[in-house]
Image (spheres, rainbow, N blue to C red):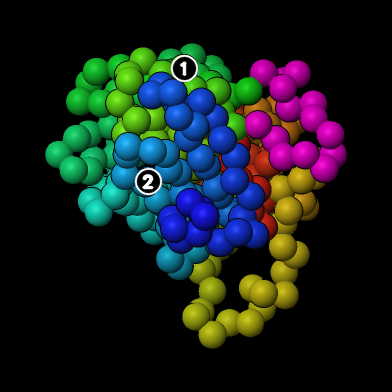
Amino acid sequence: RRAAAEGVPLWIARRQAPGPHGRPVWVAVDRRLVRADVWTEDAPPARLRGPRGWTAEPNDPVRGLTVTVGAWPATLGATLGWRKSKRSLSLAAGGAVWRLTRDDATSSRLLRDERPVALLSRPATIDTLVAEDALLPLARVAHESADPVDAVVAHLCGVAFGLGDATGTVRFGSRRQPPDEDEPLVWELPWHTGLGRGRDDSGPGASGDGWSDGGSSGADGGSSGDGGGFFGGGDGGSGGDGGG
């Protein structure tokens, strides 16, 4: 009922993770539709949409994406460069600014107004060895703030954006050109379930993100093309993979 109240179709799987306020945080993502919804009690929901799909732009990886935190539209920005330690992603909404920065090769730290609020990490390899019909895990979030709003933003960052060396990238497969509104071809393409291990079942950017084979490929990466493209992570097809 809460998912329906949040406008999340019931065919999109929902995953939960513990929140810092003693209540679960719910995460739902559909990578073909380029949408993610994160919500919990006592906090406004965070939502990401790609109204016209998403096309990887090397110099502007967040172009075409919109994010809201409750009723507030967010301003997205990404800082890329050769030095991985300088890469970051920013999200400003409701008078607050969250910034995701690289912590190490597999983790990123989330700051709110330059105060640490969470450490986000790709799941350990052993965590991804799940049954073939099971969804892969969400990013691990170590909360450093008791504010549920920070928890919602942290999980949105964990499911939609790159972590570690891939900080500043986007975890959605890219179409070279967004389809026209009346283009039927997009509905004839395979509808990824997010349950498999291969690129064909996990969207255009399935590898190189820590959720699949751990390799790297410029094809995944659209924005940086190094160290774990993190686009559409191995769980990350659409058809409502619900997270990770």
The crowding category of the residue bearing disc 1, from other C-alpha atoms within 10 Å (few below 14, some 14 to 19, many at least 20), is some
Residue 94, quarter of the rendered image: top left
Residue at the disc numbered 2:
46
Residue drawn 23% across and 40% down?
92
* Magenta residue span: 124-137
N-term-proximal mark, 1 vs 2: 2
- Which amino acid lies under the numbered mark 2 shown in the image of this protein? Ala
Residue drawn 36% across and 15% down?
144
The crowding category of the residue bearing disc 2, from other C-alpha atoms within 10 Å (few below 14, some 14 to 19, many at least 20), is many
Q: Is residue 196 visible?
A: yes
- For label 2, the SS is strand
Question: Percent x, y for residue 189?
Answer: 72, 69
Give the quarter of the figure containing the C terminus.
Answer: top right
Q: Can residue 63 be seen in this view?
A: no
Residue drawn 53% across and 17% down?
105
Residue drawn 45% across and 43% down?
38
